[in-house]
Image (cartoon, grey):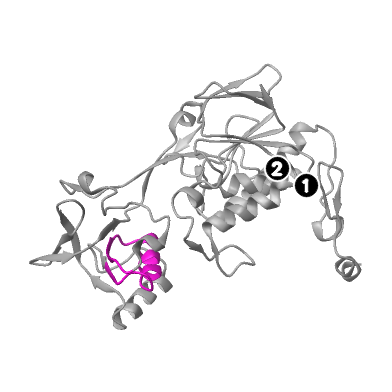
Amino acid sequence: MIKTDILIIGAGPTGLFTVFEAGLLKLKCHLIDALPQPGGQCSELYPKKPIYDIPGLPDILAGDLTQNLLEQGKQFEPGFTLGERAETLEKQEDGSFIVTTNKGTRHHAPIVAIAGGLGSFEPRKPLIDNIAYYEDLGVDYFIKDPEVYRNKKVVISGGGDSALDWSIILADIASEVTLVHRRNEFRGALDSVEKVQELKLLGKINLVTPAEVTALHGTKRLEGVTIAHEDEQILHEADHFIPLFGLSPKLGPIGDWGFEIEKNAIKVDTFDYQTNIPGVYAIGDVNIYPGKLKLILCGFHEATLMCQSAYQIINPGKRYVLKYTTVSGIDGFDGTRKEAPKAVVQAIL
């Protein structure tokens, strides 16, 4: 039996940042994740994709963000159960919980924080008859390493942020980038749409709208695609076809634990992001509430408030006074102390 103060289900960015916030409160964390390594989607789906909305970081690769979060939390010595899926949640008479994985590993904690992102996910695949044949032979649903596409002819389908962002990134890597969308309007960020239009004018992106890819061609691997554009059927050479239509999220076993579910997400109280089961919280993309934004930075905020609430449950009646790390420093579990720079302290005083 693995015992901890806060059991975190999901080792993506929100789960990893929870380790740090809990550590400041002297609370120990253990994380469970079905993936074989920490980082969630940032590690598994797009480790080389830049992220632009992390405060204080103009841009950072998703994989590097994961490494930084691991380094930030390392001083608090979190435990990990990786490559195992949380299967059952059992509430004990004392109000604590036992969570058992699909491999039988049991975890005991007074607090459970579900930070499972979108849950388990499957790419939404276009309805093209022979698409399964070309999977891993030119058809990719995720981009892990942009260098795979260097000097290649790439066709991307989609109208959201992922399709726009990867078209922009690959414009400087691939020999040819063609972005196909079934509408003239895009769903992504306005600045990304403007950047794609700019790259189109510079001849660095072929933009085909309204249109869709309807067929794939090639003998041993992908060699071309058919693009239906208005009344034309265009045969277009391609080394890679990347349909980016988003993910179909599934909560998996967590959806059977008795939570209030709305739109395949867990409803929470925004006071502390607690679910309808006292002592169980949901933070990050896995939760839903009025005005919810699925952003990493929002998950960080939710994790911070959740840890404050968890502290009160674990330490009933004990008052915690919030201290800024610029003044108090960071006390590690090993007894060492990282002091705030004297100049900072003096400036505050």
Mark 2: amino acid: Cys
**Mark toward the start of the polypeptide (1 vs 2):** 1
Quadrant in which residue 248 is drawn: top left
What mark, if any, has residue 24 been given in the picture? 1
* Secondary structure found at label 1: helix
Q: Nearer the viewer, residue 188 or 166?
A: 166
Reply yes or no: does residue 162 show up in magenta: yes
Kindly give the residue lying farthest to the top in the view shown. 93
Image side of residue 48 versus residue 319, left or right:
left
Rendered-image quadrant of the N terminus: top right
Reply yes or no: does residue 144 show up in magenta: no
Mark 1: amino acid: Leu
Where 105 sits versus 48, above or below? above
Instruction: Determine the residue positioned at 20% across, 45% down.
Output: 133
Image side of residue 2 versus residue 205, left or right:
right
Extent of the magenta region: 151-178
Q: Are marks 1 and 2 in contact (CB under 8 Å)?
A: yes
x then y, percent, for residue 142:
37, 53
What mark, if any, has residue 115 been given in the picture? none
Image side of residue 54 versus residue 342, left or right:
left
x then y, percent, for residue 115:
56, 41
Discs 1/2, front:
1
x then y, percent, for residue 183:
24, 64
Q: Nearer the viewer, residue 245 or 168?
A: 168
Instruction: Determine the residue positioned at 33% across, 51% down.
Output: 141
* Secondary structure found at label 2: helix
Q: Which residue is mark 2?
A: 307
Q: CA distance from mark 1 to mark 2?
A: 9 Å
